[in-house]
Image (spheres, helix red, strand yellow):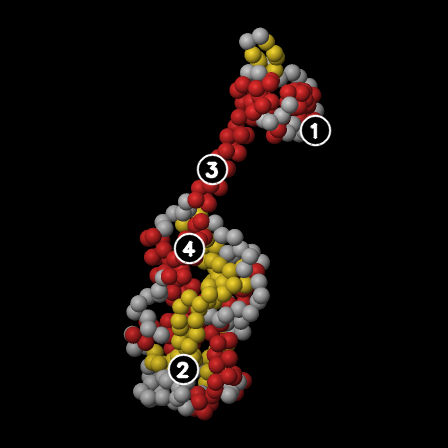
Amino acid sequence: MRSDAFRNISLQQLEALVFLVQEGNFSRAARRMNLSQPSLTKHIQNMEGALEAPVAIREKSGVTLTPEGRVVYDYARRVFKLREDARDRIARVREHEGGDIALAASTIPATYILPAVLSRFRSRCPQIRVFVQTADSQEVQDLILNGEREFGIIGRKPSHAKLAAEPLWRDRLILVVPADHRWARKASVSQAELTAEPFVLREPGSGTRDILAGYLRDQAGVELSAFNLIAELGSSEAIKEAVLAGLGVSILSVRAVRREIDQGLLRECPVADWRIDRAFHLIFRRQAAFLRHQRLFLDFIRQVSPDDSVHP
């Protein structure tokens, strides 16, 4: 038997053999397959040609399989059982709550909001697993557009036409200084004082940086370039460590510094006439079709509130 000929055995030929054995009759097997009897017979003959051996013998009592036919029949049943299992698995994914969620989030929601939110989601839907990739806001958008992640959460509204965006949670950016800084006890500082002070900033691509730059340009009439920039760092944790070490002051999400403020390590120092508010946005592709477990996650994330102890 040539191996290349064996590869030509099709699923329809295997199905013809299975139905033939189950029905014990060519005509009844053909009806189950919605074929004419000559068509079903042709499928069996083509299989026998590939095997170079007969698979079924017609007898008065029905159909008897040859040794070769028995081997093929046993494997054919396994093939169709696997097909049924796949069908059932897909149905369970669509109808039940199990499945995996591929999520990307920018630093603030990934670090300071999602752990508590996902713990609550896990309590409600323990059979759904959520895998979170942390990236800056621009990278999160790219991951969604490239189909590498299903959902994203970022600190600014995207402008890309292929992305849908929904506001989720409120946030506020605040000026933080070390507890022993000369401004720590001041009621407020002026914009001129702030722009002269050594300043530590998030890296380009950060939603926090973009929101700050937009606020300064549109509301305060000043550019980031006017600040006494000492360093750019790649995460809010790195910025906090720099501020604690006395490298400079910075503007960060209130969610990122809540613990350090409560512990007395950092202080919020208001800037006169400034209030920088923003929303974190849920993003996904506009044309995406979601399975049931993804819809369950969407419904939850749209309704849940972050830690009630956080008051931006």
Location of the N terminus (image quadrant): top right
From this viewpoint, is residue 42 visible?
yes
Closer-to-camera residue (37/152): 37
Kind of residue sitting beneath label 3: Asp
- Give the Cα distance between marks 4 and 1: 48 Å
Q: Are the two marked residues, 4 and 3, in contact with CB atoms closer than 8 angstroms?
A: no
Q: Is residue 30 left or right of residue 262?
A: right
Q: Report the residue marked by disc 4.
A: 297
Can you tell which mark lies on residue 237?
none
Going from the N terminus, do you reach mark 1 or mark 3 first? 1
Q: Report the residue marked by disc 2.
A: 275
Q: Are the two marked residues, 3 and 2, in contact with CB atoms closer than 8 angstroms?
A: no
Tag in front: 4 or 1? 4
Question: Mark 1 Cα within 10 Å, few/some/many (few <14, many 20+)?
Answer: few
Across and down, in percent, residue 299 comes to 41, 57
Going from the N terminus, do you reach mark 4 or mark 3 first? 3
Q: Is residue 41 left or right of residue 148?
A: right
Going from the N terminus, do you reach mark 2 or mark 1 first? 1
Across and down, in percent, residue 173 comes to 41, 77
Q: Report the residue marked by disc 3.
A: 88
Going from the N terminus, do you reach mark 4 or mark 2 first? 2
Across and down, in percent, residue 311 comes to 33, 73
